[in-house]
Image: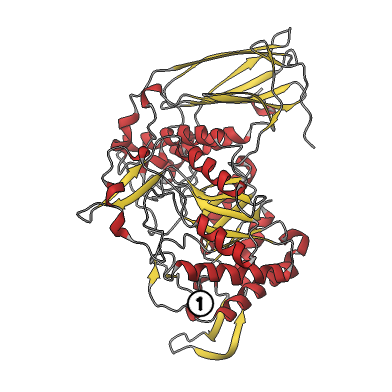
Amino acid sequence: MPVEPSASVLIDGQPSGDVSLRHIWNECIGAGRANEALRADWQRHFREAVDVLGARYVRFHGVFHDDMFVYRASNGGGFGPPTPLAQPVYTFAYVDKVFDAILDAGARPFVELGFMPRELATQTETLFWWKAHCSPPKDMAAWVALVTATIEHWIERYGLDEVRNWPFEVWNEPNLVPHFWTGTRTEYFELYEATANAIKAIDLELRVGGPSSSVFVPDARYDGEYHDTSVEAATAEASDPEVLPWKPVWIHEFIAYCAERNVPIDFLSTHLYPTDFAFDTQGVGRHISRQRDATRNDLVVMRQIIAESPYPDAELHITEWSTSPSSRDRMHDTVFAATYIARAFLQCHDLADSISYWTFTDVFEEGGGGIGPFHGGFGFVNEQGIHKPTFHAMTMLNRLGEKIALQTEHGIVTRTADDAIAALFFNYPDSMGEKSVGSANSHAETRRLADEGPERHIRHIVAGLNPGAVYDVEILDQDHGNVAAEWHRMGEPLNLSRTDVADLTKIADDLDRRTLTVNVDGVLTIDISLAPWAVMSISPATPHSL
C-alpha cells in the first residue's frame, strides 16, 4: 500500500501539497497488431516497458485478423483450395500465446475488438500490406457469436475475475472511411450495440466502450454517414488553425444513439493526436500542427461532454496519442519529442483515465518494416531495442510518486514515501511560444528546433527530508541520450553491425548523471540550469547508483 506523505515537508517554505497524481502515461501503452506480439523482440521490448516504464495495459489492432487464425470457416488448402467447414470454428492458439505473454509480463490487455475476419467481411478491399478487412460483418449474428466465444474462452482460460479487469473497445477509428471502416456511421453504431449487448450478456461487470474515433477536427467532414473531404478546404488553408472550432468526432452522436437504445457505455475512447490532415481547394493534402496545449484543451472538452451526458460516470480513455499519427515522423526519435510528451502528460494527469502512447516499440508494420534504425517510428525503443529519448522521459515519469507536493509550469515534485520525494522538470523553450514540436521528414528537418531557448534555471528548497539521504539526478538533453543525432553523425547507416548497436545503445543511455544529498538539517537544495529541451529526473538513489 502507498505510504501517506508526512505533513512536515516544506517546499520553498510552504507546506507540500497532498493531491493525488494519476499516472495516466503508463496505465496503457499501444502496439501495432496482435501478430507482431508473437515476435521475440516485441515481447522483450514489452517486458522492459512493464518493468521499467510501469506499463499496466497494452492495446493493439488485429485480434481477429486472419493472421491470428481465430475465425475458421474453411480448413487449410495448401497448394489446393481450402475445404469449407460445415460450420465455423474458433481456434485461439495464436491469441493465447500473445495474451499469455502479456499476463506473464505482469500487465493486462486493453482489448480492441477487430478487425473483421475475411470470411465474415462484406467487402474485399483491405488496408495495409497485411490486408486488414475493415468492413461491417455480412452476418451480425456470426460476429456476435465470434465475440462471445472469444470472451468465454478468455474467461475459461484466465478466470472471470481477471477478465473483468480488461476493457473491451469496439473497433478502431471507424470514422476514417474507407480506411478503418467501409460502412456508415450508423452501421458502426449498430456493430457497437450488438457487441456491447453481447458482452454484457456474458457478465454485467465486463467493461465495454467506444467509439475509438480519430482526432478532433474543426469542420463537418465527419458529420454525416461518410467522410466528406469537400468541406476540409477552410481547415487546410487556415492561417491560424487554433482559431478554428476543434471538436470531437462522433462522440455526441455515439452517446445519443446509445442513450436512446439503452446501450451500455462504460468508457468513452478517442484519439487525440495534436495534428490534422485536410485537403485544400486544389485537392492537395496538408499536414496541420496544432498548438502545444491542444491535448489538454481537447480533454477539457471531452470531460465536459461526459459530465453533461446520460453517462456521467463513464471513464475516458485516450487509446492512441503521440506527437503525430505518422510512423515515419523523424520527430519521434528526438529529444524534442521527449520534452513535449513529458510536458503534455503532466498537464493532463487529472483529465483522463489513461492516455495510451502510440506505440511502445518500433516493431510496427502498418507501413512495412521501417527503413533504417531511426526511421521516425512511434516507439520508445527502435527495432534493435535501443532506447530513444522518449523512453527516458517515460522512465522519469514512472519514478514519480502518487501525491503531488508541488506542480509548476515547468515540472512537478511528488511524494514517494515518508520524507522522500521524486521530481521531474523540463525546459520546453520559451522561444517556442504556443507552438508544438510538429513533424519532420528527416533528421536535418528536426534540427530546426535545436537553437530554441533560453536555458531554464530550476531552483527549489525542500525541507523536512531525511538528513543524509541521497538523490539521483538524471538529465536528458541534446548532448546526453540523443541517440538519433549520433546515428546521423555516423552517416545514417541503414543496417547496423553488432558493434554499431552496442555503441549506439551506450550513447542512448549516457544521460547526465549526478547526485544531490540532503543536508544535516533535512534540506535538499535543487539548483540546476537546464539546457533548452532538457528533461530532468530527481529521485531517491538506488543501490547501484550509490
412 displayed left or right of 130: right
**x, y percent for residue 244:** 36, 42
**x, y percent for residue 143:** 57, 76
- In which quadrant of the rendered image does the N terminus lie? top right
Task: Say which residue appears at 33% left-offset and 36% top-offset.
Answer: 446
Quarter of the image where one finds residue 275: top left
Count of marks overlaid on the render: 1
- In which quadrant of the rendered image does the C terminus lie? top right
Task: Say which residue appears at 40% left-offset and 58% top-offset.
Answer: 222
Q: Nearer the viewer, residue 400 or 174?
A: 174
**x, y percent for residue 317:** 58, 50
302 displayed left or right of 373: right
Q: Is residue 113 above or below residue 434?
A: below
Q: Mark 1, residues whose alpha carbon is within 10 Å: few (<14), some, or many (≥20)?
A: many
371 displayed left or right of 473: left
Q: Is residue 422 above or below residue 97?
A: above
Q: Nearer the viewer, residue 133 or 156?
A: 133
Task: Say which residue appears at 43% left-offset and 64% top-offset.
Answer: 180
**x, y percent for residue 238:** 28, 42
- The residue furthest top is 521
Residue 474 visible to the viewer: no
438 displayed left or right of 132: left
Mark 1, residue position: 137
- The residue furthest left is 282
Q: Is residue 265 above or below residue 124?
A: above
Residue 234 visible to the viewer: yes
Quarter of the image where one finds residue 123: bottom left
Q: Nearer the viewer, residue 58 or 411?
A: 411
Helix, strand or loop under label 1: loop
Task: Say which residue appears at 27% left-offset and 51% top-offset.
Answer: 233
Name the residue type under label 1.
Pro
Q: Is residue 127 above or below residue 544?
A: below
